[in-house]
Image (cartoon, rainbow, N blue to C red):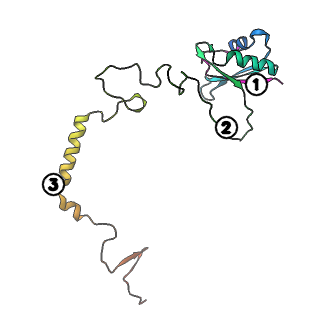
Amino acid sequence: MGTKLFVGNLSYAITEQELREAFAQNGRTVQSVRIALDRETQRPRGFAFVELATDADADAAIAQWNGQMLSGRSIFVEKAQERVPGAPRPAPRPRPFGAPGGGPGGPPRGPGGPPRGPGSPPRGPGGFRSGPRYPMASAEINKEEQRRRTSRPEKAADKKRKGEGRPEEKERGKWRWDGNDDY
């Protein structure tokens, strides 16, 4: 059995044949290539496992391909970690610079879109507008609500509070107890 490599940050359009050809350069023997697919959509998940015949071939492939461009993406190559079924997953690796979620630089991330000029409204999390959609209408509703509350303070005092009633009676389930110990 050979050495299995994890290849991450792959282009979603890459095929197993392209990966096999890339890792077979310089006379390396590729035993198997498996691109991970999403269970529901059957689309590639952006990573694969490549099994090479020897440890020397695996080390050479890591040295050649880790951080290099393949199909327009800077790929990440390391020896695959054996995972025992039911065991917790390993901690996430630091991402390379320019990769989504990585360090500074790289293309803009998220649905924010292209840079916007001065004077355009600020965007909240996820690139969506922050604040109320119709700010004037919202402010008028709040003023109206406040005016209603302050104009009739006696209504608020008239509402019965929970636990009020005759002070000598106390609720005990369905039965009332008047404080008298006579049965």
Q: In screen coordinates, is 32 left or right of 97?
A: right
Marks 2/1 in contact by CB < 8 Å: the verdict is no
| Depth order, front residue of 127/42 | 127
First in sequence: mark 2 vs mark 3: 2
Q: Nearer the viewer, residue 84 or 138?
A: 84
Give the residue number, with chain letter if any, for mark 1: 4
Q: Which residues are magenta?
A: 1-16
x then y, percent, for residue 176: 39, 78
Which residue shows up at 41% across the image and 21% down it? 113
Decide: is 115 above or below 142: above
In three-dimensional space, the C-alpha distance between marks 1 and 3, rounded to whole angstroms, equals: 75 Å
Q: Tell me the element at label 1.
A: strand
Circle 1 or circle 3, nearest the eye:
1
Residue on which disc 3 sits: 151
C-alpha span from label 2 to label 1: 17 Å
- Expressed as whole percent of the image width and height from the top left, the position of residue 107 reads 48, 19
Quarter holding the N terminus? top right
- Label 2, on which residue? 89
Residue flagged by tag 1: what amino acid is it? Lys
Q: Quadrant of residue 160?
A: bottom left
When the figure is inspected, residue 56 is found, relative to residue 141, above or below; the finding is: above
The residue depicted at 79 percent of the width and 13 percent of the height is 28
